Image (cartoon, rainbow, N blue to C red):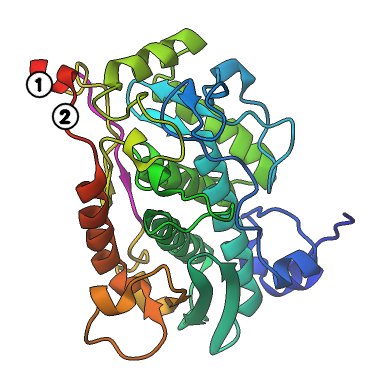
């Protein structure tokens, strides 16, 4: 696809020249990124498929195969799950996806920042997603970056909620097994945080993301060998995930990591969490002046039939829900999925 700079954006918003978002075409900015550009991984190793039991899914990656970051993906990128001492399991597909969404949202904020209000469709996932921006004309470059990160995180949270209700890319194949798995929330926020740093960098977005991701993983104590990630998975098999069931059975996921505070703490291996201080990430919530970013946007969903709006919000009127109500759906998904999770394994009983 031919791409050309967004000259209008760059000329109007000269105060943002230090930020280097990806260079995308006006057509791409007018639309939105695809719902999925990279394969997100099931939590586990050598996992069976229900329909093809002799095929094993294995998405573990080695650090040296990380490759370069490319906006919306490229065959040269390395994606998969690896383990780190301070960040736990990290799904690079999630990291890269939400990094790119953050950059896209930043470009959109730049484009409409002079308008009193704006509304944009962001594609379908559990229903059509809409973004309305407001009160953003006075935001400087740093606060526009923060706003993009906050919106991206809310979108990533909705992704976990929607998959928890059975929303999926492939027809008739549920993705409940991957909803709120151990590494999801931290991986999502890690991608958003790195993207925000890349947008502040004088380097090109893709170069900055490549450098920042490598540096961050090293600082997190990423394991150097493929076998080390396998060993880490084995330590939490029958605790966080089970190899007794095949994908897409919901029972492959035994323990889920729900978003409950603005400070996201990664899960470390049970024998390490008392000895190592985990790397915490904070969801951006305020401008540099201390004003709430929630006043600058409304992310709304017009849910489809998979989302039980009347059950979760019995007094709710209208067809749309907003990010302010996501907490109720997260709690409902938690109850719904907990009912279907398997009993503790022999390993848990012996612990």
The residue positioned farthest toward the right in the image shown: 2
Picture disc at residue 349: 1
Which residue sits at x=74%, y=33%?
Answer: 75
Q: Is residue 80 above or below residue 349?
A: below
Picture disc at residue 344: 2
Q: Give the prevailing secondary structure in the magenta stretch.
A: loop
Image coordinates for residue 212, horizontal then vertical, percent: 54, 34
Q: Is residue 193 above or below residue 24?
A: above
Residue 351 in view (yes/no): no
Toward which corner of the image does residue 9 lie, by quadrant? bottom right
Which residue sits at x=45%, y=40%?
Answer: 248
Q: What is the magenta range? A: 275-283
Q: Nearer the viewer, residue 215 or 126?
A: 126
Which residue sits at x=57%, y=64%?
Answer: 105
Label 2 Cα neighbours within 10 Å, binned few <14 / some 14-19 / many ≥20:
few
Q: CA distance from mark 2 to mark 1?
A: 7 Å
Q: Nearer the viewer, residue 128 or 135?
A: 128
Image coordinates for residue 176, horizontal then vertical, percent: 40, 49
Q: Nearer the viewer, residue 38 or 18?
A: 38
Residue 280 is one of the magenta-drawn residues = yes
């Amino acid at each position: 696809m031919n791409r050309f700079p967004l000259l209008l954006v760059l000329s109007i918003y000269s105060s943002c020249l230090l930020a280097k978002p990806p260079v995308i075409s006006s057509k791409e900015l007018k639309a939105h990124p695809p719902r999925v550009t990279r394969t997100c991984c099931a939590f586990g190793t050598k996992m069976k498929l229900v329909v093809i039991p002799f095929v094993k899914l294995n998405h573990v990656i080695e650090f040296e195969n990380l490759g370069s970051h490319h906006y919306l993906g490229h065959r040269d990128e390395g994606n998969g799950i690896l383990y780190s001492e301070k960040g736990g399991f990290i799904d690079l597909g999630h990291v890269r996806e939400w990094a790119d969404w953050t950059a896209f949202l930043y470009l959109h904020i730049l484009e409409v920042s002079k308008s009193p209000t704006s509304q944009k469709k962001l594609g379908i996932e559990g229903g059509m997603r809409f973004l309305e921006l407001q009160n953003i004309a006075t935001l400087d470059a740093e606060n526009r970056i923060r706003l993009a990160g906050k919106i991206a995180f809310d979108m990533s949270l909705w992704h976990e909620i929607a998959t928890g209700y059975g929303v999926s890319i492939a027809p008739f194949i549920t993705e409940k097994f991957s909803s709120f798995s151990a590494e999801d929330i931290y991986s999502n926020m890690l991608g958003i945080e790195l993207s925000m740093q890349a947008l502040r960098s004088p380097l090109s977005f893709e170069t900055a993301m490549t450098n920042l991701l490598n540096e961050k993983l090293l600082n997190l104590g990423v394991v150097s060998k493929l076998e080390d990630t396998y060993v880490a998975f084995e330590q939490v098999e029958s605790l966080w995930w089970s190899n007794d069931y095949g994908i897409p059975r919901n029972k492959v996921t035994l323990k889920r990591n729900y978003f409950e505070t603005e400070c996201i703490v990664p899960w470390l291996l049970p024998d390490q969490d008392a000895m190592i201080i985990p790397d915490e990430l904070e969801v951006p919530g305020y401008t540099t002046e201390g004003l709430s970013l929630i006043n600058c946007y409304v992310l709304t969903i017009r849910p489809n039939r998979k989302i039980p709006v009347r059950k979760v919000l019995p007094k709710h009127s209208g067809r749309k829900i907003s990010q302010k109500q996501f907490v109720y759906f997260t709690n409902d998904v938690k109850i719904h999925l907990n009912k279907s999770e398997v009993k503790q394994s022999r390993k848990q009983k012996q612990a």
